[in-house]
Amino acid sequence: MKRTHHCNELRPAHIGQTVTLTGWVHSRRDLGGLIFIDVRDREGRTQTVFDPSDLPPELFKRAEQLRSEWVVGITGKVRQRPAGTNNAKIPTGEVEVMTTALEVLNTAEVLPFPVDDPEVSNKVNEELRLKYRYLDLRRPEIARNLRLRSKVATAARVFFDEQGFLEVETPILFKSTPEGAREFLVPNRREPGTFYALPQSPQQFKQILMVAGVEKYYQLARCFRDEDQRADRQLEFTQVDIEMSFIEREDIYALIEGLLKRVWKVALNVDIPTPFKRLTFEEALNRFGIDKPDTRFGMELVDFTEEFRASTFKVFSGAVANGGVVKALNAKGMAGATQGQVETMTEYAKSFGAKGLAFIKVEKGADGATVEWKSPIVKFFNDTEKAALTSKLKIEEGDLILFAADQWLNACEILGKIRLYCADILKGQGKLNVPADQFNFLWVIEFPLLGFDREQNRWYSSHHPFTAPVTEDIPLLKTDPKKVRGQHYDIVVNGVELGGGSIRIHQPAVQKTVFEEVLQIAPEETQLRFGYMLDAFKYGAPPHGGIALGFDRLMAILCNTPSIRDVIAFPKTAKGTCLMTDSPSTVEPKQLRDLHIELKVKQPLATPAPKA
RNA sequence: GGGGGCGUAGCUCAAUUGGUUAGAGCGCUGCCCUGUCACGGCAGAGGUUACGGGUUCGAGCCCCGCCGCUCCCGCCA
């Protein structure tokens, strides 16, 4: 039985036609003498009617047997619904199919959870949804995400093609490069004791493609990182990976702005304004306390270093004397913060090494008229300091003022964390409106090229060692590495890091300086780890740079869902298992022998797999 | 590796804080019903309270362990 139309197609224009629909029994309404069956396919649903006065008794009898999620083919004549029975909730609601033939293509057992009721389905335990993923995907809400993902991937490919990019696939079986994230290893049967690794990203390959003269490369690349999961992190995920030759940072900005403009238009029919705002790393931290700020709401950090430089409050003046800063933020309307909330915020501060968290609750005084600053520290403040706080933080009754006095980065990050925490609470209380349909894109630029590892007493690359320094900062590499800014950029939207990249070093001399003098990596080791790349760069490497966007995160934003599991067809759990296929699982002893692998853990007879 | 939340009928949840036979809505089964679309009505079935110990006269509830899902920190660009 072939369908003539899909289930979201019939309109008044089709009235009179004989049609065949195929799909699942979405719902049945058996009125005794009359039966309505809604047939659903991926496009939508259509009401079919079984009228016994019109049908052979045998056919009507079979219609009575139909149950939810059976697979059927239904043939009949399209007709206008009787007056007053239209269903405005569905696009096919003006017509119905008067059945003349029914074919049961398959029966179905009662589903373990409903797929026809969004309100219930959305609350179903995720464990169950993942075990029966094929049923979860049948739900229109999730099916919609898959379709949108496909649409966006296609739009991206079309865009890149228009821009002259080549889509090039790079190996999944790659070489172990023990930098950054933990890798998945794949034992090599052919040579005992050797391994491939799954790529954390195609970083090296895409740079080598530039040496190969590809000039413009992109790939929707699967990447693998054996790290612990989050709502926005899976063991395997997809990057929109890009690399270009003969370009500067501005070229990347323009390209990505064009791409995202296209994607938002295609996916949501939303015109996003370009170019995007740019924030330096320093400004992002100064104002928002984080390198991926959500700029949809204010509550920005305010600096009080000068005001408290000579304060009698030693916690503040002492921090300044140590080269630190004093910063504060006004959590508008949070004076009523509970003990528990203040404790949580204090824990954040302590996790950054602070001793505690200074705060002021601005509340009505005992007389009900005056405003009182309730705080253990306010007694240390003089009138000038109080006036400065009041004016710069615009303090009013009902506010909660929070302070951090520490080294610059620490102080910013503490308040950045607290700013987001307060925003969440205020959102929950309805005191802060952060529109979900607003997209604040921005570039964060001029990251420090290097970070300092106190434990190992050495510099490390904050992005990766091939990131080019800002040209005018190159002389500082040897004299003041801390001040060197990298030609690194992150694309951020609404507090989510969508992607990042950099212009790469292509001059052997600069690369040598970075490796040997700054990062203090011995030449032999450099050769061992990056030899093939350095070799490639000897033979005419063009200036180049690139970026990678987290495709799953991008889709999660477009689908307005907090978890990338909702935009991945077959995601894994937080512990990295697939509940549907029950993987990872044990393997046959012969497989292990072939791979020259001997286990040091007891292997259970059946899955699930042993504890790591 | 660490911390938090959750686990009771097929699903979503409740169970007066340790007390009789563990309930409700939806779903499911049967019967009735000719304009429903959250159809309606009547009747019914359905429980190892994740699992294993312990405390107690008595445990869904308290304690210990363990498994799973989830969120966060660490980790991860």
Image: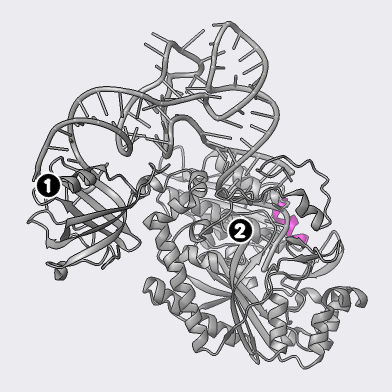
In the figure, A44 relative to A379: above or below? below
The amino acid beneath tag 1 is Pro
* In the displayed structure image, the side of residue A133 where residue B34 appears, left or right: left
Figure disc tally: 2
* In the displayed structure image, the side of residue A302 where residue A60 appears, left or right: left
Mark 1–mark 2 contact, CB under 8 Å? no
Magenta-drawn segment = A314-322
Give the residue at x 67% y 41%: A606
Tell me if mark 1 has few (under 14), some (14-19) or many (20+) residues whose alpha carbon lies within 10 angstroms of its own: some
Residue A317, position as x, y percentages in the image: 72, 56
Residue of label 1: A52
- Visible in this render: residue A486? no
- Visible in this render: residue A291? yes
Can you tell which quarter of the image residue B50 is in?
A: top right
Give the residue at x 73% y 79%: A467
Residue A235, position as x, y percentages in the image: 64, 58
* In the displayed structure image, the side of residue A337 where residue B53 appears, left or right: right
- Color encoding of the figure: one colour
Near-viewer residue (A440 or A34): A34
Specify which label sits upstream in the sequence, 1 or 2.
Answer: 1
Residue A252, position as x, y percentages in the image: 59, 84
Q: Chain of mark 2?
A: A
Can you tell which quarter of the image residue A508 is in?
A: bottom right
Q: Are marks 1 and 2 on the same chain?
A: yes
Residue A320 lies in magenta, yes or no?
Answer: yes
The amino acid beneath tag 2 is Gln
Near-viewer residue (A205 or A439): A205
Where disc 1 sits, the SS reads loop
Residue of label 2: A234
